[in-house]
Amino acid sequence: MDLGIAGRCAVVLAGGGGLGSASALALGSEGVRVAVADISQDRAEHSVLRVLEAGGRAKAYHCNIGDEASIESLYARVSDDFGSPDILVNITGGPPTYRASDVPFDAWEQEFKKMVLGVIRLTTLALPAMRHSQWGRVITSTSSGVLAPIPGLVLSNALRLALVGWSKSLAGEVGHDGVTANVIVPGRIATERVQQLDNERSAREGVAVEAVRAGSWATIPVGRYGTPEEFGSVVAFLASSAASYVTGSVLRVDGGLVASI
């Protein structure tokens, strides 16, 4: 199926991670020119290699999304190399684990910059060109914690909710300009982050990590973790011309994990 986005330009934040790399590959396979941004240049380069091996076009960019100057530099460099981005895939890394009563105040400020302000800053920079061309896609990844708070992940639960409210508000403002804004809610996807959380729970509860994983699978109707490629496919769909009437939405990619309607 031709998704109608060949030749477009995309920026994928946290593009060196599991979700970001899969998103870059999915878009690159559709002929999108992909700017892979990550705080780790090596990880970004690895994602670029995957896109190139699939016949796509991509370039790696170092970016600290918690730093305003770094975000502005990223936008300028991508614009010089590929033109103004048409597609933004806003992914941020997982924050440290804390209970709500234990979070140091400076952690709130630090993670807010990385998880919220960086995403909003990049999008604000890209929007004028999107609106002028009457075409754009803003795709923001959050967590199932925005629907059902996850114990021990209060920073993620709280801060990613800010992105949901922002994205919904943005969708109402830019829809008439051909720009869509949607949120993806990934559940338990088999990434390094999920492996880390499983390992931490294993150590905390004194049980084998295999038992932790089996217990987690038992709560998911499809009976397994999702793959990064399944997440990337949803990103590609939301970026497509076929999704031009999908905006202001919160789309779950969780195998049925969250029980609420």
Image (cartoon, grey):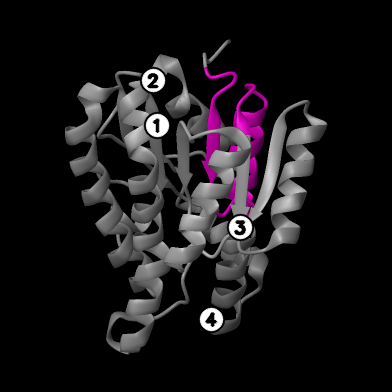
Residue 70's spot in the image, x, y percent? 51, 63
- In contact (CB < 8 Å): disc 3 and disc 2: no
Q: Are marks 4 and 2 in contact (CB under 8 Å)?
A: no
> Identity of the amino acid at label 4?
Glu
- Give the residue number, with chain letter if any, for mark 3: 38
Q: Identify the residue at horizontal 48%, vertical 58% (top origin).
A: 71
Q: Going from the N terminus, do you reach mark 4 or mark 1 first?
A: 1
Closest to the observer, 204 or 122: 122
| Residues at circles 4 and 3 in contact by the CB criterion of under 8 Å | no
Q: Counting other residues with Cα less than 10 Å from the Cα at mark 2, is it few (<14), some (14-19), or many (20 or more)?
A: some
Point out which mark residue 243 bears.
Answer: 2
Q: Quadrant of the C terminus?
A: top left
**Sequence-first disc among 1 and 2:** 1
Q: Relative to the observer, which residue lies in front, 218 or 80?
A: 80
Alpha carbons under labels 1 and 2: distance apart: 10 Å
Amino acid identity at mark 1: Arg
Q: Is residue 50 left or right of residue 22?
A: right
**Mark 4 lies on residue:** 205
Magenta residues (range): 5-33
Residue in the picture at 78% in, 34% down: 52
Residue 166: where, in percent of width, then height?
A: 24, 49
Question: How many numbered discs?
Answer: 4
Where residue 189 sits in the image (x, y, percent)?
55, 49
Q: Are marks 1 and 2 in contact (CB under 8 Å)?
A: yes
- Foreground label between 3 and 2: 3
What is the quadrant of the N terminus in the image?
top right
Does residue 224 appear anywhere in the picture?
Answer: no
Above/below status of 58 relative to 194: above
The dot on residue 137 is 1
